[in-house]
Image (tube, rainbow, N blue to C red):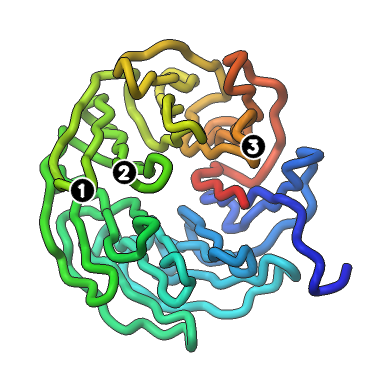
Amino acid sequence: MQDSEPLAPRAYVVGGGSDNVTVIDTQTHEVIGTVKVGSEPMLAALSPDRGTLLVTNRDSMDVTVISARSLQVLHTVKVQDGAAGCAFTPDGSRVFVANEYSHTVSLIETADWTVSKHVHIGEGPCDLRVLPHGRHVVVTNEESHDVAVLDASTGEKLRSIPTPEGPLGLTLTPAGRFVVVACFISNHVYAIDTTAWRTFWRVPVGSCHVGLCVTLDGREALITNSDQDHLSVLDLVARKEVGRIQVGPNPAYVQLLQGGRLAYVTNRGADSVSVVDVASRKQLRTIPVGVSPLGVWVG
């Protein structure tokens, strides 16, 4: 393969119990490689140009920077205790990392892969996203039960928005109009308007939510119910559960594949990924991966 040729679509699955990342070709659903990372890896993010993969390592308190083309480790960057969620800015110049046990977010400059600052933003930050316009970062704080909004240029905390207990995973609707949050303890899904920065709605659905994603048309969300071994399908317009998809034991995170017809779900209790058909609400197959997979990133 020439370096100028685009990479085929891939999924990167983080094996928290095997300290590695499993790389899957999403066109064939075959494993094409593994990469050793730090201790107790959690979540991953791919750079906007698809060239660099970042993996957070909770117990070694660092992030592993990987070439998506060669699958070689390029850098290891020390952050703080409990590294979890991570995200690139839209221009790829900066990375934000949530440190759950230090109650901070680390800002990493990708020009030289150095940490520019650590910012205290709430108690137990878990997952985060940068809005598409690049001006704001949203972070779930599992212990203080809120979502923090940061200025992406300075790292300054601008506001906190209270949520039901235990906000954990979050995602954005298309164009970033809403932040959709899964609350692990209260069993609610919560939507925040990113224009007015207010709660738009909240809906009780399923139980023990970890991760979620929104369909490409913005009409439905898929939410993992980790104690029930299925996904809830939530109609975001009617704001009610409209279906369930049976997957493997202890599902954690879910992401759509290119085109939005299929999704990958990590099954922590089965060391596998489920491939599900979104429209038919069915699991099509499972793919063995590393031990206790948590995060998955598709790109």
Which disc, if any, is residue 259? 3
How many residues crowd mark 3 within 10 Å: few (<14), some (14–19), many (20+)? Answer: few
Q: Position of residue 208 (x, y in %)?
A: 33, 27
Question: At 69% across and 29% down in the image, what residue appears?
Answer: 286
Hey, which quadrant is residue 167 in on the image? top left
Q: Which residue is mark 2?
A: 177
Q: Secondary structure at mark 1?
A: loop
Which disc, if any, is residue 121? none
Q: Position of residue 92 (x, y in %)?
A: 48, 72
Question: At 38% across and 36% down in the image, what residue appears?
Answer: 210
Of labels 1 and 2, earlier in sequence is 2
Q: In this orientation, which residue lies closer to the viewer: 235 or 125?
A: 235
Establish if 85 lies above or below 237: below
Distance of mark 1 from mark 3, alpha carbons? 28 Å
Q: Secondary structure at mark 3?
A: loop
Q: In this orientation, which residue lies closer to the viewer: 237 or 47?
A: 237
Question: At 46% across and 53% down in the image, what residue appears?
Answer: 42
Are discs 1 and 2 less than 8 Å apart at CB? yes
Distance of mark 3 from mark 2, alpha carbons? 21 Å
Distance of mark 1 from mark 2, alpha carbons? 7 Å
